[in-house]
Image (cartoon, rainbow, N blue to C red):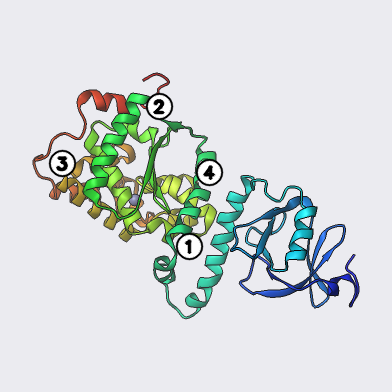
């Protein structure tokens, strides 16, 4: 029950509340009842069960709270020490780790918040809202988005991280070579995931995943190096962050999962929204340009990646995909990479033995 005016709600100092769906800052009255009651102008806004309340990151002098059953972005800020102490004494699970569902909620919540904030821009007829917003997203936030997406990706593909010793050593060597040539100014994490989907992609914040299914179809290290360089290109241009803002959480994840590398894969779902959730043609071309550039710096073949793509997708023009797909056609990509091809001038990126180890990275024994 919400108490009437002038009762216990009035006896506690006010606090600040964000409901998690709008950016509005509300001054609220609090009441310790069966649940923790949050009221505005004597109307109940929320009632949080003490067992569900968790501590959120906050500056010193403020107790910032979140609630498992509230929207992921809902926050209550208490500055009064007495109220904070009373609440802490009632919330036995205040400092328990927020469970995994929050990862999903975080993606959806942040996506909603981002979407809501760009609506105003879109209303003014600017189609490039995501382009304008992306540079404003701080790196630490990007990394959080990536972390949240990370758990989802692993759940979606049911994949485990591969890494027997010899395979991991070869993978690290290849990644290091590409990373150095790419000269990115952000730190990156890379891993091979065990799933038959032939794909690779980059998450906001700097994680690149290579799926074992793509590794299985690759015939030499240059093919994989080109793909890794392509993904670093997406990171450099912050394409995944832009797409996440543009498309929202779930379609972004599914789009990434089936969209990058082999964009037409999204057609499995025969859904336009999922097809468009993959990167734009322009973003793909820029990532390809980056890949070509990196491979040339390594003195290796840029067209190897194109050959791998063609092996995975087959000829796309025959299937009439050019109209539906946002991606450049695989054969067009290969043609472009072939034009940029030079005889190798750098040393092989891996020895034959290392390449064999990398191909077997998901095997139980190294
Ligand atoms: Zn791509």
| Marks 4,3: beta carbons within 8 A | no
Q: Distance between the residues labelled 1 and 3?
A: 35 Å
Measured Cα–Cα span from mark 4 to mark 1: 18 Å
Query: Residue 199: x, y in percent?
Result: 38, 41
* Residue on which disc 3 sits: 300
Residue 209 is drawn in which quadrant? Answer: top left
Which element type, helix, strand or loop, lies under badge 4? helix
Instruction: Please say if the residues under marks 2 and 4 sit with CB atoms less than 8 Å apart.
Output: no
| Mark 1 or 2, nearer chain start | 1
Question: Is disc 2 placed on a helix, strand or loop?
Answer: loop
Q: Is residue 244 left or right of residue 32?
A: left
Dot label at residue 362: 2
Camera sees residue 252:
no
Assign a secondary structure to mark 3.
Answer: loop
Say which residue label 4 marks: 151
Instruction: Give the percent coordinates (x, y) of residue 365.
Output: 40, 18
Residue at 27 percent across and 41 percent down: it is 176
Q: Report which quarter residue 224 is drawn in.
A: top left
Left/right placement of residue 156 relative to residue 68 reads: left
Q: Nearer the viewer, mark 4 or mark 1?
A: 4
């Amino acid at each position: 029950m919400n108490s009437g005016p002038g009762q216990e709600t009035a006896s506690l100092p006010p606090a600040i509340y964000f409901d998690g769906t709008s950016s509005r800052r509300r001054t609220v009255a609090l009441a310790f009842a069966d649940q923790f009651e949050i009221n505005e102008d004597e109307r109940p806004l929320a009632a949080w069960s003490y067992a569900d309340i968790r501590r959120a990151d906050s500056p010193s002098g403020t107790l910032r709270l979140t609630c498992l059953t509230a929207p992921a972005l809902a926050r209550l800020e208490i500055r009064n020490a007495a109220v904070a102490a009373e609440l802490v004494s009632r919330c036995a699970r205040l400092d328990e780790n927020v469970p995994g569902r929050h990862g999903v909620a975080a993606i959806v919540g942040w996506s909603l918040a981002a979407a809501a904030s760009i609506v105003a821009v879109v209303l003014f007829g600017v189609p490039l809202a995501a382009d304008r917003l992306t540079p404003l997203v701080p790196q630490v936030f990007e990394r959080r988005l990536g972390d949240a997406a990370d758990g989802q990706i692993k759940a979606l593909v049911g994949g485990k991280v591969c890494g027997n010793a010899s395979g991991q050593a070869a993978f690290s060597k290849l990644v290091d070579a590409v990373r150095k040539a790419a000269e990115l100014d952000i730190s990156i994490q890379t891993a091979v995931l065990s799933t038959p989907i032939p794909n690779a992609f980059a998450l906001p914040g700097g994680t690149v995943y290579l799926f074992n299914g793509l590794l299985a179809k690759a015939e030499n290290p240059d093919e994989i190096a080109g793909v890794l360089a392509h993904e670093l290109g997406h990171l450099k241009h912050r394409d995944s962050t832009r797409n996440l803002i543009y498309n929202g959480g779930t379609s972004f994840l599914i789009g990434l999962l089936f969209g990058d590398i082999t964009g037409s894969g999204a057609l499995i779902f025969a859904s336009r929204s999922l097809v468009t959730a993959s990167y734009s043609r322009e973003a793909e071309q820029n990532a390809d340009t980056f890949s070509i550039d990196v491979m040339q710096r390594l003195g290796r073949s840029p067209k190897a990646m194109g050959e791998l793509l063609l092996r995975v997708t087959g000829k796309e023009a025959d299937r009439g995909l050019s109209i539906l797909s946002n991606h450049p056609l695989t054969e067009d990509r290969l043609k472009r990479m072939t034009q940029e091809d030079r005889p190798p001038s750098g040393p092989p990126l891996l020895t034959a033995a290392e390449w064999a180890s990398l191909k077997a990275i998901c095997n139980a024994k190294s």
